[in-house]
Image (cartoon, rainbow, N blue to C red):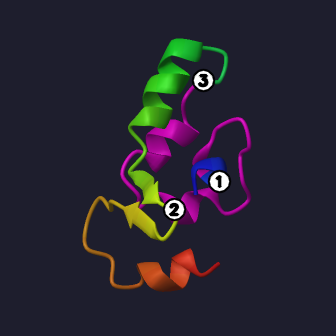
Amino acid sequence: MERTCDTKTAGEYQSILFDIVGCQEFAETDPNDQAKYEEARKKLGVEAPDDRTLIVRLTHPAPYFPTIASL
């Protein structure tokens, strides 16, 4: 998810992940401004605290998100 939201990657399905906290901001960050790029990356609402847990924070309730995540 981080790679898809990353402005440097500009993933084909980037916009469908804009329900994730910080994804749109990360996607729109100037990759040449390293400080802002790193700040936006850290604010992305996705984390994996261990090998079996994925936490995705959304900007609003999105009951359709499991379908999006399966892509």
The secondary structure type at the circle numbered 3 is loop
Horizontal side of residue 41 vs 62, given as left or right: right
The residues colored magenta run 5-29
**Residues under numbered marks 2 and 1 in contact, where contact means CB atoms less than 8 Å apart:** yes
Please tell me which residue is depicted at 67% across the width and 63% down the height of the picture.
Answer: 13
Residue 53 vs residue 7, the one in the foreground: 53
The secondary structure type at the circle numbered 2 is helix
Residue that carries the numbered disc 3 in the rendered image: 30
Question: Can you tell which mark lies on residue 17?
Answer: 2
**Residues under numbered marks 1 and 3 in contact, where contact means CB atoms less than 8 Å apart:** no
* Callout 1 amino acid: Thr
Nearest to N terminus: mark 2 or mark 1: 1
The location of residue 19, given as percent across then percent down, is 40, 62
Residue 44 vs residue 60, the one in the foreground: 44
Question: Would you place residue 19 above or below residue 46 in this image?
Answer: below
Horizontal side of residue 67 vs 6, given as left or right: left
Q: CA distance from mark 2 to mark 3?
A: 19 Å
Q: CA distance from mark 1 to mark 3?
A: 15 Å
Q: Quadrant of residue 43?
A: top left
Please tell me which residue is depicted at 58% across the width and 49% down the height of the picture.
Answer: 2
Find out whether residue 27 is within the magenta segment.
Answer: yes
**Residues under numbered marks 2 and 3 in contact, where contact means CB atoms less than 8 Å apart:** no
Residue that carries the numbered disc 1 in the rendered image: 4
Please tell me which residue is depicted at 43% across the width and 78% down the height of the picture.
Answer: 65
The location of residue 52, given as percent across then percent down, is 48, 71
Nearest to N terminus: mark 1 or mark 3: 1
The location of residue 32, given as percent across then percent down, is 67, 16
From the viewer's perspective, is the residue at label 1 or at label 3 nearer?
1
* Callout 3 amino acid: Asp
Residue 55 vs residue 53, the one in the foreground: 53
